[in-house]
Amino acid sequence: MTRYTTATDADREAMLAAVGVASIDELLAEQIPQALLLDRPLDIPEGLSEQEVNAELGRLAAKNTSAEDEVTFLGAGMYDHYVPSIIDMLLGRSEFLTPYTPYQPEVSQGGLQVMFEYQTAISELTALPVSNASVYEGPSAVAAAAYLAKLVNSKTGIVVSAGVHPHTIQTLETLAVGYGSTVTVVPLKDGVTDLDAWSAAVDGDTSAAILQQPNFLGAVEDVQALSDAAKDDSPAVVIGAYDPITLGVLAPPGETDVDVAVGEGQTLGNRLDFGGPSFGFFAAREAFLRRMPGRIAGETVDVDGRRGFVLTLQTREQHIRREKATSNICTSQALNALAGVVYLGWLGREGLPELANLLVQRTHYARTTLAAVDGVELLHDQPVVREFALRLPGVDVPQLVAYVQDHGVNPGLALSRTHAGVHDDGLLVALTEQRTKEQIDELARLVGEAIQSQRSGTTDAAARTEVSA
Amino acid sequence: MSTTENTTGRGTKDVHIGDDSAIAREAVLPAAGGSDPRPLAAPTTSVNPIQRDHATTIFEKGVEGRRAFVAPATGVPEVALDEILPAKLRRTTPARLPQVTEPELVRHYVRLSRRNFDLDTGFYPLGSCTMKYNPRLHERVGALPGHSRLHPFQTQDHAQGALEVMYGLERQLAEVSGLPHVCLQPSAGSHGELAGVLLARAYHEARGENRRKVLTPDTAHGTNPATVTMAGLEVVKVATNPDGGVDIDDLRAKADDDVALIMLTNPNTLGIFDPNIEEIASIVHGVGGVLYYDGANLNAIMGITRPGDMGFDIVHFNLHKSFTQPHGGGGPGSGPIAVSDRIAPYVPVPVIRREELAPANGAAAEHRFELISDPADLPGGVDGGEPGSRSIGKLRGFQGNYGVFVRCYAYILSLGGSGLKDASEVAVLNANYLLAKLEELGVREHLPLAFGTRCMHEFVISGGPMKRDLGIKTLDLAKRLLDHGFHPPTVYFPLLVEEALLIEPVETEARETLDAFAEALAEILREAAEDPTIAQNAPYSTPVRRLDEAGAAKKPRIRQAIA
């Protein structure tokens, strides 16, 4: 017997007898050609007891420096927000954790109603009338939206702002090859999308025009201006990638003529998890409903007239339409989307704007405080909500990051890691409600100290940073 | 607050029972394993109490002024919003999110959870989905802050534990599949398929070939053809032979130098291991095509046989299936891919490298893991061949679903190589035992095995004879199973079997459970012989009964109208 496998030796004997074979080997040999049977054990060590596995995963966890171990100002797509305790409790319930896609609605009303509520919450958040029940995560959600645009208008040009997350642009470039589209990147000007270049790039062959709000450098874009420009004499579907928390204070996509709003849902009650699992949200204008990817829950009644919920519009989907489906997505991120809707319910109607305003205030304070440090400049002076970019001319930023980390604070992302040759002296700093004024002050002090230490050439962390990413 | 339990907002009609009374606790769903005879009386008049729980959404429960969240004090000198964020960029009306307190929020979602059937409660033989037990250890280790609060942009010296997990899992998956190069990034099986088809395309294009055709058997999962379309290629269907395998003559007829790849599941969705797989591989390789293995059915073969040894070039794993990430009501999943040497130069980034460090002062040799995220940073490409990378790029943000990697790594450490093999062997034994049990009970008279005489880890029976002889369809059988406390198998798939039921019993289910399931099927057939209307109108004991799906699709109501 192996852990989790239930058949005892006696069970096996009885079951083999019932099947009419002498051994499992015989059962396999009847079906698999001899030459293909693996003639040796897998080269994977023998199994371990629960306590040994627990210890090993604990050992590996301890080798990481998590947001528990340092004060982190890292963001750039995922953020260290507080996850309320009720989310751990609800996601740990067997009834949410262990079923699969609700193919049998009579015994899946919990999950289906969660999807319905989630769709409602996302529609409210984005001010767009239709939402699906989740896609994988942020960047691939943008690529899925661009695929929808291709299905809608059959054009092949994708125009994307350089303010869009670099992972998103890379993902678009990878997946657009599949559906035969080409990606053109429009540069930034003063930290936001260059409106003239954007207008010039979007034309009659443009399938999708893609922006991010706030953009990768933290700047708030004038989305209405970008939508207007993109729709001027172009069939382009305007796609916005949003940080959902910022929609507590920023104009929603549905009110600024964005056609499809997508984004990374991690900030809505999900852990950092080194990048996943989280979820992607996907909302759109009504006209795109039947082109949407993924599961959609709908309200209906049962034979006795009771209110209930089902998966609906399944004729879009791969298991029905196969090669004519609007997407190949099957398993998505239902549990993570559950965290999202619980989180939005927990924040509530008043709480989301309060949280967003808190971020705006603390971010403003942090930006002002850091910009006052000798050797630090703003990379742009556009409005920001929760993240901002700095320039540190003449400073080795990865080395500065290592220095500050050695003092227990992670100052943010060295932009050389994502924009080498463009923003080599850049630092992207993000805030959440978990970062206090005292921590911000400490960050400013350490950044100043690190710059001074580099200038005086006494960098105790220099050796270490050579191998740092 | 003066309101009572039974009051809800906005005058919504509310007939739910006030709290978790003993009766409500007892009767959420029928007990697993058919041990509760009460719901089987049909049509019942004893309505399950929770059925009286009129579905009320969290939005409808809201009352102006109620809330759960308390914001911390800003703590910084505040500035007028107009000065830092111009009004034209701001939202004017707040999103109409729920207005509820934390106790209400908890009760709402706990009550909702009890309207779900789940794997911890009962047997879930959903074919092709591998609903095996989800060890709670995995949830514990996944929640350790060192894993769960690790930022994906953490500098690599501070994420060595995470990279070690990923490297270790890569090596384990390479060994299980017999293909040496692994990319963990894809988010789910279908995402891995897309990666795989794009890889095959890139491979051919690098050789100056523009191949368009993708061969897919008519037994294939729906994700296969859908993926082919998204990757810009064209589906060519291959027929199934009378034994349930690929029709070799049809394959030969369609295999030409325009074939980019073939996508196969082996064992396939009929639970049949294709004995001609080596010939299939040789035919496809013979015309220069690539072999793609859909790993949805990997649970049949771990440690027994390997896709790489069968001749496949690319395989995707469904970590949530074979390696037991909880399915979460439809995700998260994870769909890593493993590829052969010839496909390796094209794999997506990031790629993990293990570097040996020179031991200092006689200390033990050390190593370091490095994540190479930018294709341009790959020295000579991932195959170490010609300079510059030929990676297809990136499929999503960051590294993939790391939280899933932690759980699956823990699973493989727990089972070890021989445990994985045992898991697959028992999965196959359980499936064949259930088949034998169905024969013994006479069930197969009405629900015959669609193909073959044996199966691997799952099998397909046809409800065609049952429909003709007894007047109940597979759908009716499935709905009646709900009254017996079982989750039905996958129904009406694969498409080529009339009234199909695809049954996958998995290795973590005990013999008694399989017996009880077989008995339930037999009982439903006996009952149908006497009165088919009972099954035709089932279920009776579930939170809701059959739902109007056609009506839902005709006039879609996919969100709450909020005042």
Image (cartoon, coloured by chain):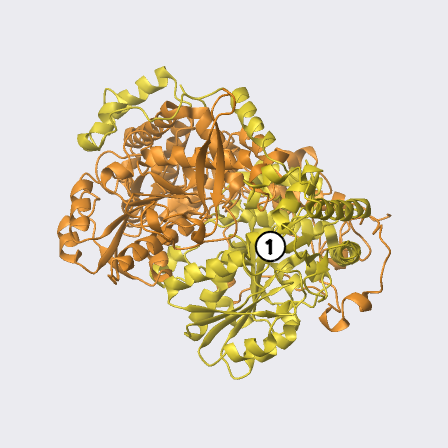
Chain colours: A yellow, B orange
Q: Position of residue B432 (x, y in %)?
A: 30, 30
Q: Tag 1: residue type? A: Leu
Viewer-proximal residue among B158 and B129: B158
The image shows residue A43, relative to residue A269, as above or below, that is above
Q: Position of residue A268 (x, y in %)?
A: 65, 51
Residue visible at 44% across and 35% down?
Answer: B354
For the N terminus of chain A, give its image quadrant: top left
Residue B379 seen in render: yes
Q: Which residue is mark 1?
A: A415
Snapshot quadrant of residue B95: bottom right
Q: Residues within 10 Å of mark 1 (few under 14, many from 20)?
A: many
- Compared across the picture, whether A300 is left or right of A75 comes to left
Chain on which label 1 sits: A
Q: Residue furthest front?
A: A456
SS class, disc 1 = helix
Q: Residue furthest bottom?
A: A233
Viewer-proximal residue among B431 and A247: A247
Residue visible at 23% across and 19% down?
Answer: A22
The image shows residue B140, relative to residue A175, as above or below, that is above
Residue B543 seen in render: no
- Compared across the picture, whether A348 is left or right of A90 comes to right
- Compared across the picture, whether B86 is left or right of A54 comes to right
Q: Position of residue B510 (x, y in %)?
A: 42, 25
The image shows residue B295, relative to residue A45, as above or below, that is below
Total tally of numbered discs in the picture: 1
Viewer-proximal residue among A329 and B445: A329
Viewer-proximal residue among A155 and B543: A155
For the C terminus of chain A, give its image quadrant: top right
Q: Position of residue B533 (x, y in %)?
A: 42, 48
Snapshot quadrant of residue A119: bottom right
Residue visible at 38% across and 28% down?
Answer: B420
